[in-house]
Structures are given as C-alpha cells and as structure tokens.
Amino acid sequence: MNSAWEIEGFLQIKNGVLHIDGVSTIRIAEKHDTPVFVFSEKRTENNINRLLKIGDVIDCRVKVCYAAKANSHKRILETVRNAGSDIEVNSGGELKMALDAGFVPEQIIFNGNSKTEKELAAAIEAGIYAIQSDSFYELELTEKVARNLGKRANVSLRLVPEIESETLHGLQTALLTSKFGMMPEEALDAFRRWSPDDAFMNLCGIHLHIGSQNPKSEPYSQAFLALFQNLVKIFQETGHRLEHLNLGGGFPVNYLRDDSNAADMPPSQKELFAADLEPSEVVRTAWEIVKNSAAEADAIKLLDDITLLVEPGRSIIADAGICLTKVRNKKERPIRTENRKPETQGPALSRDTWLLTDAGFNILLSMETYKWYYHLVSAARAGDVHATPYKVAGPLCDGGDVYFDIEGKNRLPDYRLLPENIEVGDVLALFNCGAYSVSQMFPYNGRELPEIVFTNEFKAL
Ligand code: PLP
C-alpha cells in the first residue's frame, strides 16, 4: 500500500528507501552530507503548468508571476522562467537576480512597502512591467525618480480592501491592520492626480494579495470582485482604463497529505495545513462571480483588454523541495506527568526519546516564526510503519529550536511518529520545504548553510 505522502513519479518508496524523481535520498545524503535541500525541477515545472491553466478558464490574458521571495535560488529562477512563468520581486536585490536569471523587464513586477529611490530608479531604468506602489508617498517618490530619469514609470497600486482569509494572522495582507498597501479611496485620488497621458507616471493596474496559504476559495472571489469594482470606479471617475488586475498569490499547499502526526492538531489548523485548492478552479469561480456582478454591459467590456496577474510562490516551489537531515544525538528522558497537557496526552509513555537533528530553524525559519508543519519520515525506512513517538529537535543553541510547539499554540504535534529504533546517523526527510526556507536561511551559531542540489544532477549516477 502506498504511503499517503507519496506522489507518483516524484516522491516514492523503492526498496524501502525514499526516492525523489527516482533518485535515492540516501545516496544524496551520502554525497552531500546533511542537512541538504533537494529540489525537483520537474515538479516545479508541473506546478507552473497547473497555474498556467488559469489562462484556459477565463477570457483574458493571464500572467503568472512567480513570487521570488519564496525561493530566489538562481537555478530555480531559471527553471521557473523556462517553464513559462514571469516574476514578482521585492527588492532591488531580487530585481537584479531576476534580470541575471534571464527574465526580460516586461516579465517583472516589483512589490514592497519600503522601496528606496535607488531601487525605484533601477526598476524604471529597466522598464519593468509594473512597480506595485504601496502608498501615496511612494507614488510621489516614483514620479520624482521617473522625472529625474526622464522616463515613464509603469505603476500598479496595491489596495487593502478589507478582505479576510482564514490563514494565520501574520500571513493576512489585505486588511487595514496589515502593513501593506493603500485604501481604495487613496488609490482613486492617485488616479485623479496623474492623468492617463501623464509623461512620467503610467498608472496601469491595481493589485492586492489576500495572504499566504489561503484555505478557502471565497476570499479570492471577493478579491477579484473588489478589483473589478475598483476598475469600474476608476474608469468612471477618472477616465483611466486599466491594463491589468493583480489577484496576488497565496494558493495553498497540502502539508498534510499524510496527517498521521496531526491527531492533536486543532481542526482549524488542520484545515489550514491540509488546504488543497485548484488555482484554475478558484479563478474560474471568481471570474464567473465578477461577470455575473456586472449590471451594465459597458462595465464588463472594461475587462476585454485586461491582463490578469497572479503572483504565487508557495504553490510553485514548496512541494518541489525536501530537506534531508541526520540524527546527530539521541537521549531518553522521564516525562514529568504534571507538565503534560490533558488534551494532547499523546501516547502513554513514561519516557521520551529525543532525536536531535542537524536541521534547525536557521534553515527552516517558518518552523519557529509560524510553527509551520513539515511532515517528517525516515529516508532509509520510508516504507516501515511510522508509529513510534519521538521528541524531535534541531541543533541550535536555542530552546525554541524544536519540531513541536513549546508555546502552547497547538499548531505542531508534540511528538513525531517514525519507525521504532531510529538511531544516530539515520537520515530523515522533511517534505514540502521548498518555499520560505532557502531564501530565509542564516548561519546562526556559525553553522554552515546547507547545499542546495537538484535531482537532475543525479540522473547519471
Ligand atoms: N505576493 C505578495 C505581495 C506576497 O506578499 C506574497 C507572500 O507573502 C506572495 C505574493 C506569494 O505568496 P504565496 O507564496 O503564498 O503564493
């Protein structure tokens, strides 16, 4: 019987060993030591093809702009570009990375809430598709920089239309309480201030991003509707005919394909980590709602020449990457029963077995900041029953560097289930680690950063 986490042609068990794209993870760990991140270019391409299908379900041009912040490794950017995606960057640094990876300016949009004059100048000089402006102040700054350069800036305005998603608070970004964007009324003022034929400011689009790992489709429909209503209002009140609408990213990844470790997780957290939306279905539904909402035929006509942008990160790269880590230390401890939470008793143990790995939150920061769940299996015994509970922790000199939740947020399970008798030297694999990991790594405790390898490199072995 297959394990719930197996994905045909990608993550599979062969002779008991975890294979990624047909390559043995044990072989990879032997060649590169651990921790090591392993990426599948094939899986990345499949994910992009899935997103490009959005273009098949609506009657306008679609641009998929990969959110480089999710993982800006050069080879991943090149893979993404070759697979037909455009790109969203968040700083002058990411803009340079995108250009170095071969993206042409027409493929680049530039987000961010604290852009410097230098960054704006680089974007305007390059002539990118859109600078996504965060505030009225930034619009004025953009105009100043464009005027100095004698060039016209393509600008899209980021809105916060008060749309709530059922994701984590820190990941919600379309609310007034988030730090991003401007009120729709401010945006309208901007469209009044800069006319469609302004020499330096080409206000050509509007943008929003409701958050990351959004478990439900409805907020996307609300978001698309909000974009459409703003588009109509902007046209009616200022005469600007927008060229694009940007629906943002945030399509979820199912981190709980195997939910055997999630028995203690509260249902809402489980729903979040197990979210599984089909992006093209989400957009098809939203598109229908928008079309049905348009009372006047003239309004819907405004969509005729529109390009719809989406800027997904996680759904392109999260499940294309795994992290291999080794157990470097093991110990037993008696359990202080008074410390055990009644609702998360876990197995009736008298002792905890601790496994100390070489993968800490310095390479998987979300495990600390958001108590993010990454499913863990034994690489050499991937096909064995995973039912023995272990306390698992990383190597950092920080008591919070653990694979469970010591702050009582109940987002992570208290124990990880692995085969019995896991020993020092055994390789473990963490799944779905491709997004918001490599791009956020730091060498805390002077630890060397892991290598990043690609399954293609092993094909010849
Ligand atoms: N767009 C913006 C503005 C973002 O802030 C983010 C991530 O936070 C993304 C796109 C990508 O989100 P995700 O990786 O969830 O698709």
Image (cartoon, grey):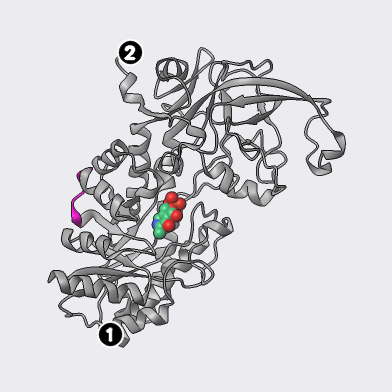
Q: Name which residue lies at 57% across and 42% down.
A: 367
Quadrant location, the N terminus: top right
Residue 96 in the figure: left or right of residue 440: left
Q: Position of residue 335 (x, y in %)?
A: 82, 30
| Residue 40 appears in the picture as rendered | yes
Q: Dividing the image into four equal quarters, which quarter contains ligand 1?
A: bottom left
Q: Is residue 233 magenta?
A: no
Q: Name which residue lies at 21% across and 63% down.
A: 121
Mark 2 closeness class: few <14, some 14–19, many ≥20 residues within 10 Å = few
Residue carrying label 1:
193
What residue occupies the far front of the structure in this picture? 446
Residue 127 against residue 32 in the figure, above or below: below
* Amino acid type assigned to the residue bearing label 2 in the image: Leu
User: What secondary structure prevails in the magenta region?
Assistant: loop
Camera-side mark, 1 or 2: 1
Q: Name which residue lies at 34% across and 43% down.
A: 72
How far, Cα to Cα, is label 1 from label 2? 62 Å
Residue 335 in the figure: left or right of residue 310: right
